[in-house]
Every structure is written in C-alpha cells, then in structure tokens.
Image (tube, rainbow, N blue to C red):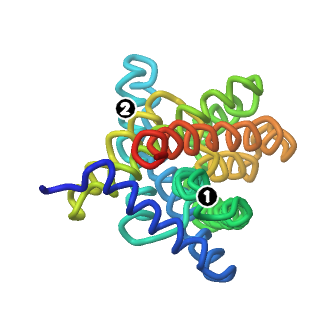
Amino acid sequence: MGYYSPKEILERVHETARYKAKTNVSKTLVLAFMAGAYIALGGLLSMVVGGGLPGLAETNPGLQKFIFGAVFPLGLILCVVAGADLFTGNTAYFIPPVFGRKMPVTAMFKNWTLVWLGNFVGALFVGFVLAYLTDVFANDPWKSTLFHIADIKTSAPFYKVFVKGIGANWLVALAVWLAFAAKDITGKILAIWFPVMAFVAMGYEHSVANMFFLPTAWMYGANVSWMDIIVNNLIPSTLGNIVGGSLLTGGLYWVVYDRD
C-alpha cells in the first residue's frame, strides 16, 4: 500500500510523542523557535501575495481568500518535512499515549508550554527582522490589510475566537495526521496543503500564525495593544486550538483505534 493506514498512523503518532517527550529542553526550544519562524514565513508570504490584492478582495473576496490560503501552507510543510516542533501539531500527538496511560500528563503539559513559548519567539523574530526591519508592509495595500487583520482578530468576542481556534487546529492536526500517512515528500506536501489552505481561506484562528500577524501589526503602529493581542486573541485561540487538536483529532482517533 502506498500510504499508512489510520491505525498505522496512530502507531507513528505514539512514536513521535515518545521522541518529543524525551527531547531535552534546549533542543525542544530550538525546534519550537524554528516552527514558529516557519509558520511566520508562511504568514509573511500570504500577506505579500494575498494582502496585495485589494481590488480582488472587493470584487471577488472568495478568490482573494483562496489565494491568501493557498500559499500559507509553506509554514507547515517546512515544519513537517524539514522538522520542527509546532504547538498546534503537538496538541494531537500527545493525546493517544496520555489517554492510554502510556505517558504522564505532566510530560504533555511540559512540552506544550515549552513549544508554545518557543513558537512565540520564532514568530516574533520573523515579524521583527524579516517583516518590520525590511519595511515589507510599510506601504498600502499591505499595511492597511495587516491593520485590518489585526483589528478583526482582536475585536471579536472571546467565544468566537475560541470556536474559530477549534476549527483551525482540527484542520491543522488533520493535515499533520495525513502527512503521517504519506510515504514520500510529494504525498506529505499534498496532504498538508488542502486542510491548511482550507482553514486559512475560511478565516479560522491559528494561535501560532497570530503570534506573527498581531505583533507585526503592532510594530507597524496598528491600534492594538499587547493586552488585546494576548487576552483577546492568543488565549482564546490557543484554548480552541487545544480542543481541535487534542479532542477532535488525537482523542477521536484514540477512541477508534487504540482505546481497547
């Protein structure tokens, strides 16, 4: 068979979780920094390409959102193929062994905490060095698009950002799950592209991507504060991402293929 079966995917997930749990703190932080930077690079590319189409956004907003989402998967492709530690993917990896009592829950929370922080630093690095210092968004339509994104993401009610976070990471975790099924790089790229493109085009909330978009908008002078960024978006999107990845992906597949 040219791909791994769902049950075989779960076995590979167990192996991945065990490996990540055994990785020391310094290496985990480096891998997390890389993942945050990679996702930010995907966001940077999406902004340059999709954010530079204001006319299309007015006349054909669905197509503009599709283009924005079509290039964003660069980030997760780099994480999966090149190797990096992404918080949103890890919310799914650790659930089967933890639910099956093959790994302590403390190991899961330790990894999640370290990786979330490392992702944030990596995203901030790309936002400041590659987006702000280079003035890539200094002019319209990119600057106004970035400000518009920041305003939408920080002004929505808590529950709405939370629910959008569930949708985002259900699809991102499934993208990683599908990548486990593929036995070659081409298959992994295709497996990642469709779900990630979908969540971006649908406007869902990915906490690590927002670690790039929102601080970068703040750097450029958008009318958002760090309180807005963290309380109004990163906290609810992170919680929603945990639900989408852990319960709707890792948890459901554990129930079906590993619970007995």
Residue 193, how many percent across, how many down?
Answer: 33, 46
Mark 2 lies on residue: 66
The answer to whether residue 135 is visible is no
Residue at 37% x, 47% y is 71
Indicate the quadrant where residue 230 lies.
top right
> Considering the numbered disc 2 on the image, is that residue within a helix, a strand or a loop?
helix
> Which label belongs to residue 89?
none
Which residue has dot 1 on it? 101
SS for dot 1? loop
Vertical placement of residue 174 versus 187, above or below: above
Work out which quarter of the rendered image holds the N terminus and state it: bottom left
Residue 33 sits in which quadrant?
Answer: bottom right
Q: Select label 1 or label 2 by which is in front.
A: 1
Mark 2: few/some/many CA within 10 Å (<14, 14-19, 20+): some
**Picture coordinates of residue 210, whole percent (x, y):** 64, 46
Residue at the (53%, 71%) spot, across then down: 18
